[in-house]
Image (tube, grey):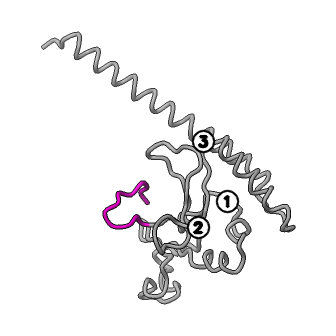
């Protein structure tokens, strides 16, 4: 039978909303790609220790302007958790905010992972992906300990800090999914 005018109007509103969401998502992706490409111009940290702070500020400022947020690694608010990751600015729900740095082991190379077949016994910095690939951030963390600016020297990607994200304490809801 024929639909009511209200049902038809709601269907049309929904279709228009989905179209705007798709357009917005596409625009964000395109803008993010363009803006992050602009970071490549300044992505190589200076070798002079004195210039590294100003370089990091410039990268953070460009990222904040490009995507609305930047990430800071500093002592965690979770007791006894070491370092944590904090968002400066605003990230909308569902936004991918960080990358997991490290060595990538596809399923056919897992036997090369140090400590195989039980690498998790000696390495707290592993993440397994849905396709069986494992990423090992331990080399990044070891470099962090040797050099306080190691995060910046290793990859020069200010978003490559997901290995520093902590689980919340018991009885606390997470504010991030990974």
Highlighted range, magenta: 167-178
Q: Position of residue 107 (x, y in %)?
A: 45, 75
Quarter of the image where the C terminus is located? bottom left
Q: Position of residue 120 (x, y in %)?
A: 43, 83
Asked which secondary structure carries label 2, the reply is loop
Q: Nearer the viewer, mark 3 or mark 1?
A: 3
State if disc 1 and disc 3 touch (CB < 8 Å). Answer: no
- Mark 3 vs 1, N-terminal side: 3
Query: Which comes before the other along the chain, label 2 or label 1?
Result: 2
Q: Which mark is residue 68?
A: 3
Return the x and y of residue 98 as percentages of the image width and height: 55, 57
Tell me what residue is drawn at x 43 percent, y 55 percent.
176
Q: Which residue is mark 2?
A: 101
Q: Residue at x 67, y 59 (%)?
A: 157
Mark 1 nearby-residue class (10 Å; few <14, some 14–19, many ≥20): some
Write the residue at 70% across / 70% down: 154
Q: Please name the residue that numbered disc 1 is placed on.
A: 157
**Percent position (x, y) of residue 55?**
79, 56
Q: Are marks 2 and 1 in contact (CB under 8 Å)?
A: yes
Discs 3/2, front: 3
Front residue of 105 and 159:
159
Neighbour class for label 2 at 10 Å: few (<14), some, many (≥20)? many
Quadrant position of residue 62: top right
Q: Quadrant of the N terminus?
A: top left
């Amino acid at each position: 039978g024929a639909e009511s005018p209200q049902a038809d109007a709601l269907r049309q509103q929904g279709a228009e909303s989905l179209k705007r969401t798709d357009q917005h998502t596409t625009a964000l992706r395109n803008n993010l790609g363009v803006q992050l490409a602009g970071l490549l111009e300044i992505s190589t940290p200076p070798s002079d220790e004195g210039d590294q702070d100003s370089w990091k500020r410039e990268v953070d400022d460009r990222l904040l302007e490009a995507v609305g947020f930047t990430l800071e690694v500093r002592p965690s608010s979770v007791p006894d958790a070491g370092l944590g990751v904090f968002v400066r600015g605003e990230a909308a729900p569902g936004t991918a905010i960080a990358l997991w740095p490290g060595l990538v082991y596809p399923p056919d190379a897992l036997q090369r992972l140090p400590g195989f077949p039980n690498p998790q016994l000696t390495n707290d910095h592993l993440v397994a992906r849905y396709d069986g690939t494992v990423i090992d951030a331990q080399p990044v963390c070891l470099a962090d300990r040797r050099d306080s600016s190691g995060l910046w020297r290793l990859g020069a990607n200010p978003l490559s800090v997901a290995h520093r994200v902590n689980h919340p304490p018991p009885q606390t809801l997470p504010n991030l999914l990974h």
